[in-house]
Image (tube, helix red, strand yellow):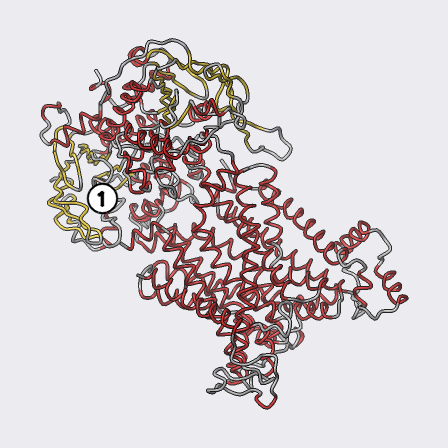
Amino acid sequence: MTLLDIQNVSLEIHGKPILRDISLSLQQGRILGIIGESGSGKSMTAYSVMQLLPDGSDTSGQILINGFDVLSAPEDALCRLRGNEVSIVFQEPMTALNPLMNIGNQVAEAIRVHEPSTPNHVAMQRARSSLNRCELPADRFPLTLYPHELSGGQRQRVVIALAIALQPKLLIADEPTTALDVTTQAEILALLRRLVLEDEMGLMLISHDLAVVTDMADEIAIMKDGEIVENLPSQVSFKDLKHPYSRALFAASGYIPARVRSDQTEPLLSVRNLVCDYHLPRASLLGPAKYFRAVDDVSFDIRKGESLGLVGESGCGKSTLARAILGIQKLSKGEIHFDGMRINNEQDVESDIRRRMQVVFQDPYGSFNPRHRVDRLVSEPFHLYKTPLTKSAKQEAIASALRDVGLEPNDQYKFIHEFSGGQRQRIAIARALIIRPDLILLDEATSALDVSVRAQILDLLAELSESYGLTYLFVSHDLSVVRSITDRVLVMKDGKIVEHGETDDVFSAPKHSYTRKLIASAPRFLQATTR
Amino acid sequence: MNISRNIAIGAMLSGVFTIAALVSFVWIPYDIEALSIAERMRTPSLAHPLGTDHFGRDILSMIMMGARTSIAVAFVAVGIGMGFGVPLGLAAAAKRGSLMDELIGRGNDLVFAFPSLLIAILITATFGPSALNAIIAIGIFNIPVFARLTRGAALSLWKRDFILAARVAGKGSAHISVEHILPNLSNLLIVQGTIQFSLAILAEAALSYVGLGAQPPTASWGRMLADSQTMISLAPHLALFPGMAIVLTVLGLNLLGDGLRDFFDPRLRNAEK
Amino acid sequence: MLRFAILRLVSLGLSLVVASIVIFTLIEIIPGDPAAFMLGLNAQADTIAVLRAELGLDASPLERYFGWVTGMLTGDFGTSYTYRTPVSEMIGERLWISLPLALIALGLSTLIAFPVGILAASRRGSLVDTVVMGFTQLGVAIPNFWFAMLMVLVFSINLRWFSAGGFPGWDEGLFACLKALTLPAISLALPQASILARVMRSALVDTLDEDFMRTARAKGLTRKQAIRHHALRNAMIPVLTIIGLQFSFLLAGAIIIENVFFLPGLGRLIFQAISQRDLIVVESVVMLLVFAVILVNFAVDITYALVDPRLRRPS
């Protein structure tokens, strides 16, 4: 019998259509990947199977789990199903666990709720073995730990442990690794694959990341605007794709913008023996002051006109390093020189230096004051001019900056909430560009964007660097993006630069063991398409 | 729909009493300082819509004058709270973790240990009772309320990227606090200001009731209730109308505050659509 | 946990010291000569001199401050000028009216607010929610002393179920005393319960939207089970803060309500003392009340840590 059989399912929430005529099926022991960009309805498909939909939802069609009709089942039968026959792993491990309950009880609860006669010590034993299966051994991870004492990856293992505690037949994983670093992502995916094999589960893996899904799944469904546009076997080549959207999606995922390399070797910015420490709260009232060394004796140059990548996982110190360069971070030791001028501590950076250096941040929603109009947002760096511009010169600069990033001069009279994520990132680039800086620091600038939008922004960056001779420092955890747009790359771990070199050399022949691990962890789609 | 209903009812109720207070500057039905023993303790009639008190004064006129006292005290007290609290909160957030932040935090804790009644008791014990005491006592109590609220909300704003962008543009923390932080707090402050306004009206009534607030001949709702207490079995309407004035004003302000909060909350507004 | 408790205890001590300095300065330094102030305008120079000696005003302010503080630590709060009795005795008697009143009101308010708030939150948007929240909206707007007057009007004057005021004294038996405290406690508790129920509701509503509630439902818990086992404890964190704040309002409220019911508690004592300019009594009663508020805040902080492992075992 088919494990999961979804036939012509449509979903409306408060009368608004979310899913249209979805049909999917999944056999035991197989992995079904669902790919889609944000808002495509892929998560709602998962919630429909569990019937964990928001109030005001109306599902039609048929969903069968081993022949059990989910949509006509009463609530108490659904409660018996959830966590027992079907389980789900969510995207955000940081908030998915109850912060006030220890992990043993949270896993054991999944057992007790379905088998209430289980004695407490037996439930705890079974919780223990479930955690062990998820590679959280008893010596380092006792049942009495609380979620806040675990990292994001470890928390996701706890969530998986409680999902598989009763060995369900169907497991749904909704973007299970999106919030995690690439090496942790590889571990969690390997864990999921192992569990599917051991328990002969069916796994429905939902992700926006084409590479993750093509790497794992036996078959793939591509979703767009609440519909399935294409059903594919996993071993697919580009020419098999029929729907234009799938073709665009695959093309954008491995996209490499055309760029011209600069051949200058003169440094624009040089960092020498840089150290940045953060103070930590004292362990005891009278103990010595403690500190955390975020950046540990780092030296490198950025050459004029080049595009330099800085890769590393969260907490490696790359954001602190970026802030130090921008002159908004206290330096503990070492020096930073920009074109011969020294960047001191946060307060007294010369406006001449600031004027020649701008930044684009990750989050297109948080980078703008929501109360200001686009003209005011984009012209904020004019604050750095000692003599204010005339009104007409300012107008002209705003209009040309907006044109440069592919927007209309009239867009300056709008507020930021009137723009999409990709357009906002264009506005962020306009804000960085308006003052004609030499260096633009891109801090995870494409990480929050859907792949198709990301490809457009990468093109724009390549184009601008050519026409204005810009130098980029590209800070990112996303190896494929860094590989596609940088000339040289620095790999950072625990505050140190562990490897640096030409991007192609580092990626094809990594020397440091950490770089090798990092590249091996990146899903295989990367290697397949950037060849 | 619920949101705009709250705002409409709230604005109407608090509007009525504000207008009554404003009208009292130019006109009231009867002079409240002229006593008329012949007219004492009348029940409501055409001549005296809300009746008269034990000195024969018109209760409607006294409630209009009392509205003036309540609103003035609450307005100035909340003004003091905001005027000191908001800058303190902004400064504490701008220099998070500094000695100044720590001092402001401890100072807030300390003031919170003194309910406004205790502050009023201390001030009255040394300076004697007056409406000014009520203003100072309620005002002081409001400072940490606004300081904490501002600091908390400002801290979460300071983490946002648009603040980093402003720092990269070379703006100092005072400049950023005024240009970027404060405008984004305005909704929150309007809502909290409305709530604190209603609490201040309750506090003023309580202080006047125990004799620590407005003194005769200044009319005050709390004072009217205190005077009516001994005659409550003979003339319950003396206690009824000033009390209802307080309840309706406070209710109106609370509805207004709740409605505005929901109106400003983008999550709720989207859910309504 | 221990470290957390010690840190809180240190901050409690510091707050007490600063509070005592503020009170001492306001009462004994700002008026200039407290003796002259207490005796009023018509006092003779020699009576002032006698009182000055009695109060030990010839000593420096610093010495007087330390004398006051060490006195309080050993239970000696000084002697009331008007009654000529030790202040500690006067406070002792009256504290046993004000404190039980505030505590009964706190208990009552919590007992009413929790079920109401939980009911409204778990049926968010329903008719029950709307009606209940409408009532609390009204409850929040009612001044407790006016509510008390209405209660007297209805239950004492019209129905004659309770006497209109006064206190029999604890010697007359628990029942009689509790009966005398019933109306005051209810009139204190209902407006506070309205506030608390609203906080409970909104804290619970926020918690219901948390990701871990979805995890709980995905495990197979019913809606009710998920609320009982997961949401309630998490919602308690903001509710605790308000309960702590409410105690100080209830204490202040108790002082005011005592006026309506002619209860011989701390409120009556302090207002008489103010009108008689008996600064010694005012100073000590205020210090005592501030101490109670600070102590309750300390208890709330410790309860926080018991509820929340993130405070107990910071990672």
In the rendered image, the residue lying farthest to the right is: C46
Residue C53, picture quadrant: bottom right
- Disc 1 crowd rating (10 Å Cα; few below 14, some 14-19, many 20+) is many
Between B95 and B72, the one lying in front of the other is: B72
Residue under circle 1? A44
Q: Looking at the image, can residue A122 be seen?
A: no
Residue at 47 percent across and 29 percent down: it is A387
**Relative to B207, residue A30 above or below:** above
User: Is A256 located above or below residue B170 in the figure?
Assistant: above
Identify residue type, mark 1. Met
Answer with the quarter of the image where residue A260 lies: top left
Closer-to-camera residue (C21/A196): C21
Q: Position of residue C15 (x, y in %)?
A: 65, 49
* Relative image position of residue B267 (x, y in whole percent): 33, 50
Side of A342 where A72 appears, left or right: left
- Judged from the image, the secondary structure of the residue bearing numbered disc 1 is helix
Q: In the image, A355: left or right of A181? A: right
The answer to which of B151 and B218 lies nearer the viewer is B218
The percent position of residue A329, horizontal first and vertical second, equals 50, 27
Image point (48%, 16%), residue name: A337
